[in-house]
Amino acid sequence: MLDPFSPFLVRAYFAILLTGFISLSSGFALLRGVAYLPAEASHSALGGAAIGVFIGYIFRTEVEPFYFAILFSSFTAMLVSYAGKHGGAEVLNAALGGMLAISVSFYALLRALVPAELKVVVDGYLVGDILLLTLDDLIRLATVIFFGTLIVYLFKSEILYVCFDPEGAEALGLNVSFYDYILFFFMGLAGGLAAKTIGSLMVFALIMLPAVIAKGYSRNIRKYFLITILLTLFFGYSGIIVSIISGLPSSGSIAAISSFSYIISIILNKRRK
């Protein structure tokens, strides 16, 4: 059995804690009616990471793909917001699919143009392993998460108003577009961070499912976000514990626990009704 206090496991524990804050994005996404945006943004991060790696390869210089990943995911999320303002919900959902297709195309094309050792770097954003995060990775993640969460916290009342009643917010004189762009930027940023932390394939399991489950058991906004964070932490730490005991992959363990919990929540909700 692995030593639970090994340096790489301690880093994984801290990464799960950071993921709890990232999961706030899925809570906002559900309230805003764009539940799949964090997942789309995490796949956009693939395209951004591929661009960063390709630039470094072409110019024979060391480039940190992390910054390209979060910038690209945030930019595509804001494009989705722009499309939604000029076409409504249907155009917004179509824009989600369009941005996903463009991002994955960048990923597939540029990945094919770099050598094998750089392909591994790009693929780390697809099937990221939380156990492989370095101290530098955690510092970058913590810094970006801190400032991103701070910005949303400063405008939380306005953003929540826009989520629930954009027409009413506009009638009161709020700049709905401004707050919507802040929200979409945060959700895009969170998707990019999630891709680096757990991989874009895991976003559904560890970022989206906690918010979906929490929504069925919450009577108010504070409880909703609190349950979302707690479930994310529970799924993450439980998955790592199972991985330590059994030797199974941590990502698979986390996904299995969160998926099973989601199925249980569906059954319990139906019985309550």
Image: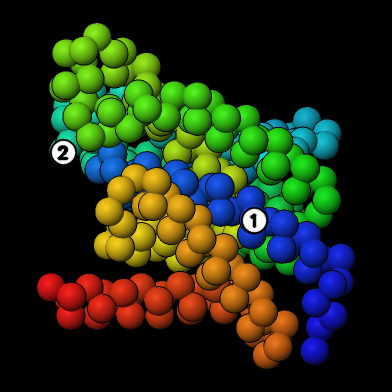
Instruction: Looking at the picture, tell me which residue is in the foreground, 115 or 52.
Output: 52
Outermost residue on the top side: it is: 173
* Amino acid at the residue labelled 2: Glu
Q: Quadrant of residue 41?
A: top left
Whether residue 72 is visible, yes or no, is no
Residue shown at the point (34%, 45%) measured from the top left? 221
Residue shown at the point (54%, 47%) measured from the top left? 22
* Neighbours of disc 1 within 10 Å: few (<14), some (14-19), many (20+): some
Asked whether, in this view, residue 132 is left or right of residue 148, the answer is right
Whether residue 92 is visible, yes or no, is yes
Per the image, the residue denoted by label 2 is 90
In the image, residue 92 lies at what x, y percent? 24, 35
Label located before the other in sequence (2 or 1): 1
In the image, residue 12 lies at what x, y percent? 72, 63
Up-down relation of residue 16 to residue 64 (above or below): below
Residue shown at the point (78%, 30%) measured from the top left? 59
Q: Quadrant of the N terminus?
A: bottom right
Do the residues under discs 2 and 1 have CB atoms within 8 angstroms? no
Asked whether, in this view, residue 7 is left or right of residue 9, the answer is right
Task: Identify the element where label 1 is drawn.
Answer: helix
In the image, residue 200 lies at what x, y percent? 52, 56
Up-down relation of residue 103 to residue 262 (above or below): above
In the image, residue 58 lies at what x, y percent? 74, 34
Per the image, the residue denoted by label 1 is 17
Up-down relation of residue 197 to residue 100 (above or below): below
Task: Identify the element where label 2 is drawn.
Answer: helix
* Neighbours of disc 2 within 10 Å: few (<14), some (14-19), many (20+): few
